[in-house]
Amino acid sequence: MKNASFNISWFDGGKSHTGTDRPEIKADGESPMRRVTLKPFGIGTTTVTFADFAVFVDDTNYRTDAEHYGWSFVFRGLIPEHNGLQAPGLPWWNAMNGATWRAPLGNSSDWQTTPDHPVVHVSWNDAQAYAKWLGGRLPTEAEWEHAARGGPEPMRYPWGSDEPSDTNTQHCNIWQGIFPEKNTEADGYYGTAPAQSFPPNSAGLYNLSGNVWEWCEDQFKIRSVSSIAKKRNQFAKQENERILKGGSFLCHSSSCWRYRIAARSGRQADNGTSNCGFRVAFDKKEG
């Protein structure tokens, strides 16, 4: 393994499940609960950090999709509102020239101010490249959910059923207040938090809810025969959308209740933003 400091939690595999029979956002395909059988696997206890990603780039001279494009989306609350081009229909996102993993907020910023935070502005393609270099891969959605629960037993959040809120902030880094106008920062953070922060789950994994969305291997798909689902799946296939799990620091129950384990989203494989990162999975070797 290239990075000796990379910590991994290992799972024996076996019978498990993905999804839920009690969905909150049905249009995302959270239901039904589906039984799966997993092979033994490992997964990083934290998301990949800026410092981790820098080692990879120094070794390979890799250029991310955002670096090729020359811009990326940044949450407007992190930057002066007159900077960047506002995204149509998404007024809380600004397209920022120069925003990449090296400069998370645009040309005047530097990743080295937050080296222990999750690397952001990384696409699914970028995450795949890093994982391969490290000797791993991206987790499947089923593996990610199994790891988030700490095993096969159904669980709403990585810590249990205790609901995070504007005042109950000990579990994760999400939005408190009125999105997107006011964040009280009751949990201590406006943007991302360090990758190893807040209490870990029972398997020793950090920040599986909130902080940054995490790429999974799977293509985004809704398991339904409805006409709406078919159209959504056709679009997802056409756009090469991949699954994201865990929600981010922008999530709130009133606007994006996707920090639950069963919650999911899809995004184009070449797209990265200021709230999107990843962690690495590994096949368990025999012997």
Image (tube, rainbow, N blue to C red):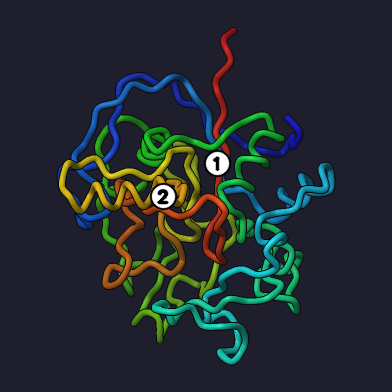
Residue at the outermost bottom position = 82
Quarter holding the N terminus is top right
Residue sitting nearer the eye, 93 or 52: 93
Percent position of residue 51, x then y: 73, 53
Estimate how packed mark 1 is, as few (under 14), some (14 to 19) or many (20 or more) residues with alpha carbons within 10 Å.
many
On screen, residue 44 versus residue 210, left or right, reads right
Residue at the outermost top position = 287
Quarter holding the C terminus is top right
Q: Residue shown at 20%/56% (left/top)? A: 24
Identify the amino acid type marked 2: Lys
Give the residue number, with chain letter if any, for mark 2: 245
Relative to 96, residue 270 above or below:
above
Q: Please name which of the two marks, 2 or 1, marks the residue nearer to the observer.
A: 2
Mark 2 and mark 1 residues within 8 Å of each other at the beta carbon: no
Location of residue 73 (image quadrant): bottom right
Percent position of residue 181, x then y: 40, 86
Q: Residue shown at 74%/34% (left/top)? A: 4
Residue 220, which numbered label?
none
Percent position of residue 8, x then y: 58, 33
Relative to 18, residue 84 above or below:
below
Residue sitting nearer the eye, 187 or 85: 85
Percent position of residue 224, x then y: 19, 42
Give the residue number, with chain letter if any, for mark 1: 45
Q: Residue shown at 43%/76% (left/top)? A: 186
Estimate how packed mark 2 is, as few (under 14), some (14 to 19) or many (20 or more) residues with alpha carbons within 10 Å.
many
Q: Residue shown at 71%/72% (left/top)? A: 98
- What is the CA distance from the residue labelled 2 to the residue labelled 1? 15 Å
Mark 2 lies on a secondary structure that is strand
Identify the amino acid type marked 1: Thr
